[in-house]
Amino acid sequence: YLQELLRHEDQGPFANQSCRCGIEFRATKNQAYRCTECHDWTLYCQKCIVIGHETNPFHIVEVNNGVFFESRQLASLGLVIHLGNHSPLSPCAHAIHHPPKSFTIIGIRNIQTASLKFCACKDSIDVDRRQLLRARLFPATSTNPQTAATFEFLNFFHILSFMSKVSMSEYYQTLERITDNTGRMVPPNRLRESLRLIREWRFLMLLKRSGQGHKPEGAMNMQPGDLVVRCLPCPHLGINIDPASIDPTKAWLTKRFQGLDANFRWTRTNVSSEAKDPSLNSGNAFFCDDQAFQRHLGRMSGRWPIETSDCNDHDAIKLANKRGTKNLAVTGIAMASCMRHECIFPQAVADLRLGEEYIIMDYVNIRSLHVNPPLRLTLSYDIMCQYSKKFEQRIKSHGDLLSLPDSLSVSDMQLLIPKFHLMGHQNSCRHQFAFNYAKGTGKTDGESVERVWAESNTLAGSTKKMGPGSRRDTLNDHWNDWNWRKSITLGEFAKHVDDKSHFWDLCKSLDPSLMEIWRGEIARWDENHSAKNPYESSIHSLKLAHIRLNLAKEDALLAKGDHPSSSRCLGGILLSSTYSFALRHRLIFDHDQLGKHATPLQLAKIVERATNVRSRAKAWIVVQALYMPVTTVLRAESESRLRSTAAGDIQLFLPGAVFDAGRTCDVKLIDTEWRLRFAAAHDELEKIRKYMISHTCIINYKQKYGHGQREGTRMATALNSLDLKIQACAARYKMHYNMIVRYSDTLGKSNIWHDTLRPLKDTDMRDLDGSVKDCLDGARVSWIWLSTPKDVASDEHINDSLRIAFCKARAKALRSQEECILIQEEMRRSLVTLEYEAVQWESRADGKGPGDLKNEVMGGPRAYAFRQAHIRRQLAAGCLEKWDGMDIWLAAGPGGISLKDAHFSFVS
């Protein structure tokens, strides 16, 4: 590879060839030329290389100086670019005697000087800039231009800046180095002109793609938000929603999901001014009109002072009270975006002057609602608990100059907090403002604005030192491209997660009368959040002292080895053996937990327990020899093989073990052991549940009061003790479960245990209370709580936990059904909106454009309109292909709901 790269430095196989015109390079003093951009490494003479590049005038050629190749610009070889309606082979006759003008051309691969001749015919267009534009060269100035950029360069950088966030300064320096990487022949500095060119190009592309060039008045009468790419799946009255045909029972499908947030990365230094650097698209895209915005701030200044928060002191609350920083004209931006599809709404961005002031957030929120006014609104904000306190009073104080749309009132709004931010709030906020418990929200998480920040935060550095107008124009263009990318990737809906079957599994294990009571509590809370909260515990938590006392009593009982004496019956004998089996297993487990540096007291306790186990085992062996003589032979074989006298190694040879050893055993004995293990497995589950509740109580206590080294050590000790007990119970449960599975078919008991006993994994042993995963809609209730007997109401702690589990599982099932319906509705709305836009573009094809333009110019707008209509229909066709059968899949299965159903059958 290296040798092949070096080969290109020489003339290669063309060294002894002549030019196509017959000139011999070696026989004459003519120099050999070649083009580095054409797919042709043939050598040409100067005349032929110029003629061959009359249609590619901005290529860079190389000349062989006899030793190596040097770069040359075609203008230095005599190439002149003729403008106007003339071809290169027949230039304008009236311009023959006019000297060419020297232009600096910024191309996609280099910066070079070119010679241009303008058409001088009487009937030609009389403005130089038009001749340049028709040659696909964009002039840097409107009068007497001397610099121009190719359309290819502007279009390439435009898209590149969207995807890589590269600045014009960085890209221009790249072009300088490509043109000359030695620093000796640097092209003329046209960075300032390049910045102006790309800003104009961005604005013109916004006008072109929004159809402003097809209006008779052009861009002179634009309305707020006219330049924005609309969110296709969102409800748009009169486009994809017919107000006259809305079913009241399905009206929740017409609401808009809007998320508010502020970003303090987007600062701007105090450079330039509105007078020196005005915005080209002020108020017509995402940023609100600055003049109206400043008037609003001046009118509301001091009327709503900053209030002290009564919620947790997290960063969003602190930043809301942040003061301005020296030398910064802007301290951040506020934004409103679509929570479902992450598109940014028109008129939904404004600069922050101090902190996250509510009057600025109000302005952004309300202004965005006036473009495509919704009938209902779900509003999300990471400090909604504080923002919502005087929300209605603030709106009234704004007066008619900033009022809600006529179609919307505060009572039509759901005020929520994004799921990830919810854990930073107090416990009361986690229920009142939770998406998981809000009707009609589906699986929406409310974090859409954060994803917009993640994509565009890279721009903050390059826009920090821009003037106010340049910054707004740049961001408007980038966010419009963001909306467009969301439109062209519309077919990729998130995979649906079904929580309905899990809810029904939970219902099977609960008392129907209790569930009916809980449903009533949910209904009352949905109507009025001041009612009893069914998602929150209603009993006092267990005290840490009580838990420690209970654990101490259990340990004391275990140390004494107290157990009721068994009867002489066979069942009593096996019951005694299973108790000895449990003591032996606990001894082995505790011995393994001692570690290398056990204290003498710990070792003494283990020895005492080992003695107790050994004595019980000997008593069992004597009785077992009477009922199961075969165990005498098995035990002798085992002792000769193991040769161990440790208490933990004593084999009890229960009936199942005898049968597994290949010896005969009475089926009645195996059946008795099976029933005892079945009961013991449930006992171990009950212990795990109680230990898990104690574990949760200690965690909650630790979060509130367990600060400092002393309290932290006490909490850690208690938690470690509980964890060991849970692990021991889990190990015993697994042994019982394995025997139950092994003999259930043989004993004909395969249908009586599957509903309550399952394989136990470490991930199954989790509590019922809320967690971060629960707030993020990623947690399910473990099956160990589903196997609780229906008479569990006697334990108020478990009953309270099960109520919370039922309410949360029901809420998740409802959100799952709502998500299925929302996705179906959004699919329908997207297709309708695309067809509406296609028809709208087709209607523009026959319209009259601005000004008195010739027919040849008007052919372009017509073709562009039909191309845009075609793009919309192609997008719709792509969506239909991706969504083929998806509506059937979303509505399939138990509890599935189709958008076409006359009545939605939600879980109860």
Image (cartoon, rainbow, N blue to C red):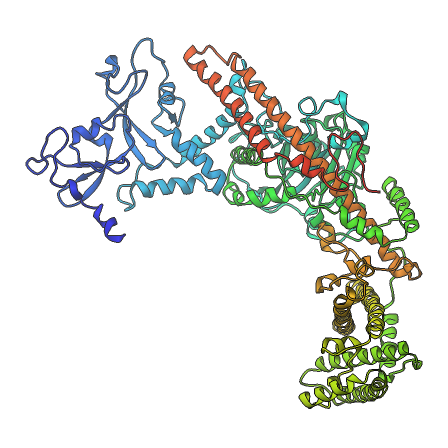
Nearest the camera: 750 or 441? 750
- x and y, in percent, of residue 554 in the image: 86, 76
Q: What's the residue at 84%, 80% (across, down)?
A: 577
Residue lying furthest front: 664
Q: Is residue 90 visible?
A: yes
**Residue 43 drawn above or below residue 700:** above
**Residue 676, above or below 173:** below
Q: Quadrant of the C terminus?
A: top right
The x and y percentages for residue 831 are 62, 28
Q: Say which quarter of the image contains residue 905.
A: top right
Q: Count the marks.
A: 0
Q: Residue 367, percent across and down?
A: 68, 30
Front in this rendered view, residue 550 or 278 = 550
Horizontally, residue 156 falls left or right of residue 207, namely: left
Taking the spot 26% from the left edge, 53% from the top edge, the residue there is 2
Q: Is residue 229 left or right of residue 115?
A: right
Q: Nearer the viewer, residue 832 or 427?
A: 832
Q: Nearer the viewer, residue 449 or 8?
A: 8
